[in-house]
Image (cartoon, coloured by chain):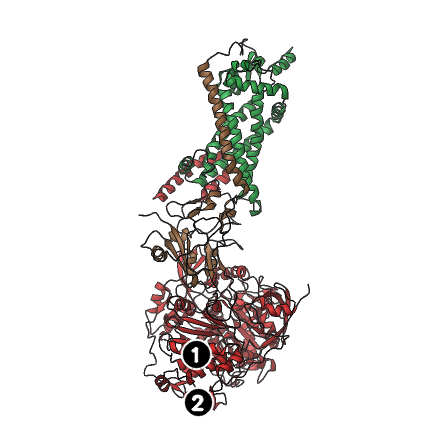
Chain colours: A brown, B red, C green
Amino acid sequence: MAKQQLAMLIDAAKCIDCKACVLACKVANEVPDGQWRNWIKPADAAPAPGPAPRAKARFQPGACMHCEKPTCVEACPTGATYKDPATGEVVIDETLCIGCGNCIPACPYDARFRNELTRKADKCNYCPERRAAGLAPACVDTCPTKARVFGDINDPGSDAGALYLRNQARLTRVAAKTDTRPNMYYLGDPGPGDWGREAVVPASMVAMKRSAPVIKALVGLSGLGVLAMLGRQLFAGDSGEGDHKEDSDA
Amino acid sequence: MPDTRHTLSRRDFFKASGLFAAGAAGGAALLGGLRRAQAAPAPQWESKFSACDMCFNKCGLIARVEDGVVKKLDPNPKFLKSRGMLCARGNAGVAQVYDPDRLKYPLLRAGGRGEGKWKRIPWDEALDMAAQKMKEVREKYLPCGHLFSAGTDLHSQFVGRFAEVYGSFNVTSHESLCLVSNNRAFLDTYGEVPFADVLNSKYIVMAGANRFEALVTPDSMDLMTAMRENGCKLVVLDPRYTKTAALADEWHPVRPGTDMAFMLALAHVIITEKLYDPEWIEQKTYGIEQLAEHVKPYTPEFAADECGIPAGDIARIARELAAAAPASMIYPGRRSSDYEDSTQIRRAFAIVNALLGNWDRPGGLLAARAVGLKGVPFDAPWYDENHEDRIDAGKVPMMFEHEGSFLVTRDCVLAEDPYPIKGWLVYKTNPMGTAPNRKKTIEMMHKMDFVTVIDIAMSDTAWFADLVLPSQSYLEREDPCSGLQGSVACACVVKRDPVIAPLYESRSCFDIMKGLANRLELGEYFDFTIDEYRQKQTRDIPEALKVMDRDGVYYNPSKVYGIYDGKIYKTLSQKIELYNQRYEQMGLDPLPRYTAPTRPDKSRFRLIIGRNALVTQTSTANNPLLHQLVPTNTLWINPDSARSLGIADGDLVQVASGAGSQELRAEVTDRIRSDTVYMLSGFNTLSTMQHLSHGNGASINDILEDDYDAITGNASMHTTFVSVTRKVA
Amino acid sequence: MPRLHKRHDRSDIFIHWFNAACWLLLLLTGVGLIQNPAIDPFGSGYPEALRNLVGGGGNLLAVHEGIGLAWIAGFVLYLLVNFKGARFFLAEVFAVSPGRDMAWMLKKMVLMTLGPKALKLLGMDPSLPDQGYYNMGQKAFAQASVVGGIVIAATGVVMYLSDRTLGAEASGWISWAVTLHFIAVGLVFAGLLVHVYMAAISPEERPGFKSMFTGSVPDGYAKHHHRLWWNKISAGEE
């Protein structure tokens, strides 16, 4: 069996911008006041009276896209954020995250924030507690127009997998200046999909990455020095004794 | 499974680390770090069925309860009426129940009316006092000297029951501030108020409704399914570019108040082009000849001038509607508290539907289905010494007896005409916050000897009361059964059982009514439990209660279509009345006659109201969760109008009418016509015990003038003209 | 019995070995906390294995934090008990005589690795300039340890407080703390390798190594390795 890739498939054409998903997520995950794990972006189509053809308004629900190439993971020094090889989720290990914030600008979709209460990185996690209880993620469960389908897109037997296979050619994703290959797919026109910015790795993390080889080289050099000394001690014996008198008074 | 291994190794680590941690300086932090688990465990919650109460829809929900606390409200997937969904407000129900602003114990007014000085008193004292005051009012002003107002709630029937046994005919509901004119119009056309088979419709014209924002289940959900999956076409008429308009196939920014001209023009085209089914019309309707004659002058060109919609579009829409008939409709809508001829406007809607022949057929308008729930009758005592009728009786020709007209009643109370009303009991409705012309409601309060308000929060109505009693929220109380019509989705029964123990000293409305009845020697009329009441309600469907315990809902597998096959209509002609004979007898227009609405002069705007999916009027403006999405209300104003007034987006503006004036921020947007402005209701409450809505934004009911529909007394909330001026900072 | 000179008192010895033990554990756990292909020193296998061993990265972090706090507490305790000693140590360590000490350092490096012949080939005198209480090698490592230790402790505390008291506005500080913590540990570790060899493996410093247990060094060792100090104490004794 192919490995899992949990993903969200959203029929954006069904979204009525009612924010049920936004509030359901907030309550389910006890997200602090003023912070949100998901959103609906309205496409600002200018109102044009009359019949089609005219630009119809579109609403684009979004959240962490559990990317194939997650730039947030690259920005995390500890692996507290990682792509779970078993499910394809981008996971935050809250116990390991200390809230350094490196991953936040690293997400081109601004899906991450520092939770004011836990003080750790936060984002959509597909509601693991609910899934453990056999329920769909809160946003999927509550959606009035059932615009969302969640599941393993690599399993053709699942709703999500079947939908994914059937519509592969017309599914769209949000594009960012840094391509992260998101796993949030839109069926139906989600409106402008090129708003993703560049993934920004903070200067401190860049410094850490750049200094790492230098540090490794220094440690290596020091190690080589020690080896040289050890070698000299073991093989060259007391050849220097005459010139370098050690302890004549002993 | 890796999970098992993790669990084991974690447990082992606890043992090992305990020793280490004891000696470590960072011991506390260490344990803190260890407490968190890596794999997500399933929550230890109990799941309990209930029905939402964040608006009138009563969507089925499952409360997830942990240690007696509601953690989350989820949709009940088996609840067909709401299509297994719970909207944002439904999700925000937890914030209503646990709102720190909730009323906690009985409060007695300790200062002037509306001054906000309160004294906490025990329940017995509160009920003794309320009963004593009711007794005094009845003795002094006869039973009808007491007014009772109850909102849309399953306990409201007990207020009605109490009023009846107390002897007062004066009961008002919220409906005369909302939907009675629409109900009147359809009732007077079809003999009943229909449900729309949105799901199976192929062509829907939506005017005076905003289903993707003002959610109605299952219509809102079914509309999307119909459009996205069944290719249904949606045409929206709205002065605002609502989300419904934005998602429609066609949007026409109709001139407010001209919908009737549009509908009559549709009828004109359908009749002159013979686009209707003559056999069906002949069999099922009354008055096609009169209608044909009546609509002759209402050409598309005539309507175009009135509505601001091109005549070609109007004619085309008529043809498209007829081509899709009978699976096409003029969506009946709900809130019709808009104009002084709103019943006639909605009659025009009903008439076009009749021409489409969509009654009782897929994709059209459906009759009410059998639910199986029975009433619980009782013999109320008769009071010889009483007034003859309601205080508002006869002021408008076709008022609904059981709903009354709040605005007419208020005028009568102020004028003490034909008699004085000096006592008022209000349950779960907030006329101070929802009825136009707030100043008059305040005056009405001052007319009262004693006002008791039962609510979960200190609403503005409660703020002006003498006695405020804390009621239970929907998740804390036991409710009688309620029958719901879900269009094609279902006809069902729901009930509510407590999901959590009542908070604070809150009591259910039933308990309060029972307590009052006992003190007024009317105890025999409340000598039952809710459970016994439910048994009586479900006597014809004995399995219902058990099924509701299992599924959270009981469905009656009743007939959906063809209910009227071989049946007569409950009208004078026993047919669908295009031409209403009763109206003729009463001297009303038997066919809707169009009167052009007054147009505001250059310096003024028509103020219109409306909802969005995050707002249920005054009951949600103070909700801490919803507040984060709708922090205040703004005045929508068109960029052209704003420019001429020197108003920039976000400017503070003063909005003034003949009734009052309020200040709020301007939202300059091309989503509204230039002759119209719009704001949300519910904000700028007087009550300081609503922390988020008090002093925040503008109170719309302070500005709205109190005109009403000439036929039903329904408030007409789109007839106020306002001036808008920029406030200099 | 050779004449002995007292070099370390008991608190010095304690703090040295306490520090050594803490550093060892902190290094082992700390390296396990770095898991990013661009930086982790031994690849991702080590952190993975270590985390599994303790039941997850969170536990490892907790252990690391616990030891780190204990380490800081140990130093605070040391300063309370032997502030004078600490001040003496810092004064000695940071007193550098550029000409003599740099020459010592360079020559010593060549001597230890290539031998005296290399120096002779370069036309230099292979004999080393006299050194004081600490030789320049010891001073260099001690300086690195003191400065590095302070940086490590300070950044460690910032990181420890990050998810406990600090807000989002501190994110920049925390992120830089992570980086500085990493760099400081790396630099100190590079020095540590030499220190461990010189002190524990190299035979010539054996008496110095022993003194980290006994507290004293033999007179001859002091005379040859720390001539200036020997001069001073000898003068004092006379």
- Residue C115 appears in view: yes
Q: How far across and how far down the image is residue B382, in percent?
A: 47, 83
Mark 2: which secondary structure?
A: helix
- Residue B191 appears in view: no
Q: Quadrant of residue B601?
A: bottom right
Circles 2 and 1: CB distance less than 8 Å? no
Q: How far across and how far down the image is residue B6, in percent?
A: 38, 42
Left or right side of B44 for B728? right
Amino acid type at image mark 2: Gln
Pair 2/1: label in front: 1
Give the Cα separation between the discs numbered 2 and 1. 20 Å
Which residue in the rendered view is the most extreme toward the right?
Answer: B728
Quadrant containing the C terminus of chain C is: top right
Judging depth in this view, the residue of B418 and A178 nearest the camera is A178
Picture residue at 37% right of the left edge, 50% below the top: A5
Left or right side of B240 for A126? left
Vertical placement of residue B452 versus C219, above or below: below
Amino acid type at image mark 1: Ala
Q: Which residue is mark 2?
A: B290
Judging depth in this view, the residue of A54 and B244 nearest the camera is A54
Which chain letter matches label 1? Answer: B
Q: Which residue is mark 1?
A: B318
Judging depth in this view, the residue of A67 and B527 nearest the camera is A67
